[in-house]
Amino acid sequence: MMNIIWFIMIIVGMAVAVLTQNTHVINDAVIKNTQEAVVFAIGLTGIMAVWLGLMNIAEKSGLIKKIGRIMSPFIRLLYPEIPKDHPAISSIVMNMVANMFGAGNSATALGLKTMEELQRMNHHKNTASNAMCMFLVINMSSIQLIPLSVLKIRADAGSLDATEIIGTSLVATAVSTIVGIVACKLLERKY
């Protein structure tokens, strides 16, 4: 469906550019903006590689398990249907930690691993379980202690104080996460 929407948007944009005799806009978009997209993607690759490497070291050293034990009461409250010491717990913890430190792109790989683990426990394979819904809500709204990707984008854009967004990001994401958790818990009772 998204491919169709993108195709229609591109065709309509090109048709409007031709009809208004602004075909140079198409060339600018194809040549200049695609180059900027590649440079941006390569810049994010460095952050992702560093963060995934750190998370891999933390997992192999046992740090993630220790963090998981500390967060265990909170995780048990959010995901009561996941058995204790299930691999999904460590995946959830790693994803939460990656999101808290703003490595959202790196957290995607951990999120996919978590969803695989949760799907194995799901009795209705064609319907998302409560744990899967809760995980998605927390993943998408997660608390950002350090919004690393946003800081990089602001620094690349020439911001004089790229870190000034940390306080507001923390408040906004904390509120969104709390609201999401409450909504999930209320809907779990109904459905």
Image: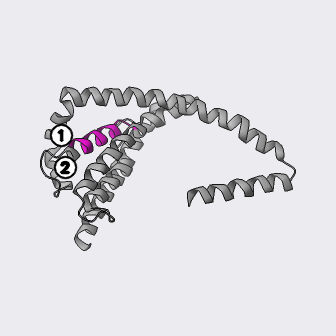
Residue farthest along the bottom direction in this orientation: 190
* Residue sitting at x 60%, y 33%: 38
Give residue 99's quadrant in the image: top left
Indicate yes or no whether the magenta region holds residue 93. Answer: yes
Identify which residue, 76 or 183, lies in the foreground: 76
- Judging from the image, the colouring scheme is one colour
Residue farthest along the right direction in this orientation: 21
Taking the image as shown, residue 25 lies to the left or right of residue 67, namely: right
Taking the image as shown, residue 103 lies to the left or right of residue 26, namely: left
Q: Give the residue pinned by disc 1.
A: 68
* Residue sitting at x 13%, y 44%: 85
Regarding residue 67, the answer to whether it shows in the image is yes
* Residue sitting at x 30%, y 64%: 183
Label ID, residue 110: none
Identify which residue, 53 or 123, lies in the foreground: 123
Residue type marked 2: Ile
Which range is magenta? 90-103
Q: Give the spatial CA distance, label 2 vs label 1.
A: 8 Å
Residue 93 position, x and y percent, is 24, 42
Residue 175 position, x and y percent, is 34, 53
* Residue sitting at x 34%, y 27%: 53
Indicate yes or no whether the magenta region holds residue 147. Answer: no
Q: Helix, strand or loop at disc 2?
A: helix
Residue 75 position, x and y percent, is 19, 49
Q: Are marks 2 and 1 in contact (CB under 8 Å)?
A: yes
The quadrant of the rendering that contains the N terminus is bottom right
Q: Give the residue pinned by disc 2.
A: 75
Q: Main secondary structure of the magenta part?
A: helix
Q: How many marks?
A: 2
Taking the image as shown, residue 84 lies to the left or right of residue 159, namely: left
Residue type marked 1: Gly
